[in-house]
Image (tube, rainbow, N blue to C red):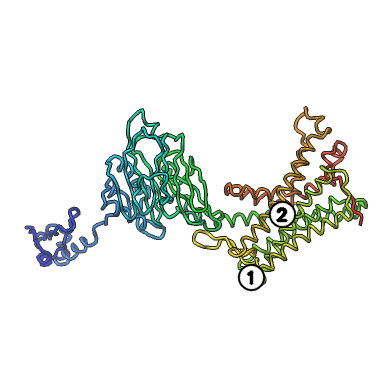
Amino acid sequence: MSHLHPSSQDCAWHGTDLLKPQHGPAWQPYCCISFTEEEMEDQRGPQLLRGGSELGMENSRKELRSKPEQPRNVCLGLINEGQYDSFHLGNTAKCFSKCTQSNTEACDLENLQRYWLKFEDHLVESQSGIVNMSFLKAAVQNVSTNISEDLLFSLMPSQVPRQMTEDEHDHPDRVRLPRSLFESLQGNRSEVWLAITILDIGPGNLFKGAQLSPEDSSYVLNNRLVGLSLGHIPVGPLVEPLEITFSHQHLPPNMTLSCVFWDVTKGSTGHWSSTGCSTELRAKRTICRCNHLTFFALLLRPILDQATVQALVRISRAGCGTSMIFLASTVILYAALRFYRRRFKSEDAPKIHVALSISLFLLNLAFFINVERDRVPLDTVCWIQGAIFHYFLLCTFTWMGLEAFHLYLVVIKVFNTYFGHYFLKLSLVGWGLPALIVIGTGSANSYGRYAIYDKMNGTTLQLCWFHEKTALSALYITVHGYFLVTFLFSAVVLGLVAWKIFTLPSATVGREQGLNWKGVLTVLGLSSLVGVTWWLAILTPLGLSTIYVFALFNSLQGVFIFCWFATLYFPSRGAMSSSSGTARVDQVHTTSHE
């Protein structure tokens, strides 16, 4: 006969454990059920009878203890589904910190993210006013579809969103909803409910997406999401985009911001997308313009993360190594031509090509020495290496500018182009001017260790270059500014040369037959001399793909120079018989009188 006992003491006397109820409030008293020895014998059956009653009772206790109650895991996203009171919101928010890479607790990111995405619909449907919690600020407001001006709401992370006026400047974080958004809904309803949410998602894996992997080093700025919703009312692409302004401090070096929204259709759990959004970067704020309503955020991305730097270094090593072989071949070929062709000694154009080849070869060699070390050397050695690398970089820029200057003389100006000791003067500029700049820069102690960091302040690349903190102004003036001057001059000269090549009478005679391929190839060859591959650096802010294109083509500049040099001074018989002034534009030269 079984008995119901009210206390654990009675249960202990009868040799049973407490049976915790599976449901009910936490304060509900436990009950226990005990059996007499005879009843236990009946329950166990013949096997228990063979082992003895006392041994059988002990085995029964072990069986009960071996099946503990399974804990209820909130982070699986099912227990609190559809429940949005303060208790369940706070309970689910604990998963923001629990669901991390290092935590072994099971988490269902898809269910948890769906829970928060549906929260806005719940706000609109319940018209619940405001929510003010440490991790969540939300407000619901009734808006007429017949408004006369745009709506502004504050988005301060410490305050509940509220409507504001244009003149209020105390709230740099704000959202502007265009009047056209509500006017487009006038045919269906006279007013709508608008939900605005500010959600702190913490450092965990929630709302990070597949793209924000640890190797990517990207993260949501301040872990803050901004949600905008009209509930289940369908809102198509907006004619006039909404504007969300995020305030922030100055960006860390090598980092950039991009406006994104949470796209539930991407991947198994969703991830961030920038489709339909544009980003306007300012000093201490960023303006996002998007043509839809959902959860928005700012992604802080490294311009060069560790994986990207390693890939770019590998590409540059391969390209620079190949270029060095072809640049050395160009110098050897020039020396052979000087030996076999006496008149070749007096031509200035090949001398300028070789000077550019030598400076570019030495720059590639300095690059190899700079990136092939596991550790940055001592300060004095690093200072010297940084100065040498800077010097040959400026020499390369200078000789590319001198190539453009020579083109201007022989193609554009043509007449009155005589200069005594012409190549000697070019050499003084090509090798001397960079030396003066490096001496001046070095006297200000500008050279030293330069590092590129990721978001965790981990070093992705170290170079002997400019001091990363104290010499940025010298870097911008002597490298970026110097490059910009040579770029503008070379671009203007190359444009004029190209215009003249394609407007020559010999080029226009066969225009009806199709494209002037000889002129195109000539312009491409001259482009390698004036450094068009370096111009791609201007496009690198457009994205990672342009950085890869720049690294690939720029590292192969030596190959292009060799191809142009060999084609120019070793033309085939067919090319010699049919070549025009366009194909031989670089062979026009001034003579040095030394």
User: Badge 2 is on which residue?
Assistant: 322
What residue does disc 1 label? 377
Left or right side of 566 for 537: left
Q: Is residue 137 left or right of residue 180?
A: left
Q: Report x, y in % for residue 585.
A: 83, 42
User: Residue 101 sits in which quadrant?
Assistant: bottom left
Q: Identify whether 171 is placed above or below 179.
A: below
- Determine the secondary structure under disc 2: helix
Q: Quadrant of the C terminus?
A: bottom right
User: Residue 132 location, x and y as percent?
Assistant: 30, 52
Circle 2 residues within 10 Å: few <14, some 14–19, many ≥20: some
Picture coordinates of residue 176, whole percent (x, y): 42, 42
Considering every residue shown, the one lying at the far front of the view is 167
Residue at mark 1 to residue at mark 2: CA–CA distance: 27 Å
Q: Are marks 1 and 2 in contact (CB under 8 Å)?
A: no
Q: Picture quarter containing residue 318?
A: bottom right
- Please indicate, yes or no, whether residue 37 appears anywhere in the rendered image: no
Q: Which of the marked residues, 1 or 2, is nearer the chain's N terminus?
A: 2
Name which residue type carries label 1. Answer: Pro
Rendered residue at 63%/60% (across/down) = 473
393 vs 514: above or below: below
Q: Is residue 181 above or below residue 112?
A: above
Does 194 sit left or right of 579 as displayed?
A: left
Circle 1 — which element? loop
How crowded is the residue under tag 1: few (<14 C-alpha within 10 Å), some, or many (20+)?
some
In terms of image quadrants, where is residue 421?
bottom right
Instruction: Tell me which amino acid carries mark 2.
Output: Thr
Vertical side of 592 occupied by 385: above or below: below
Residue, x 64% and y 60% (percent of image)? 475
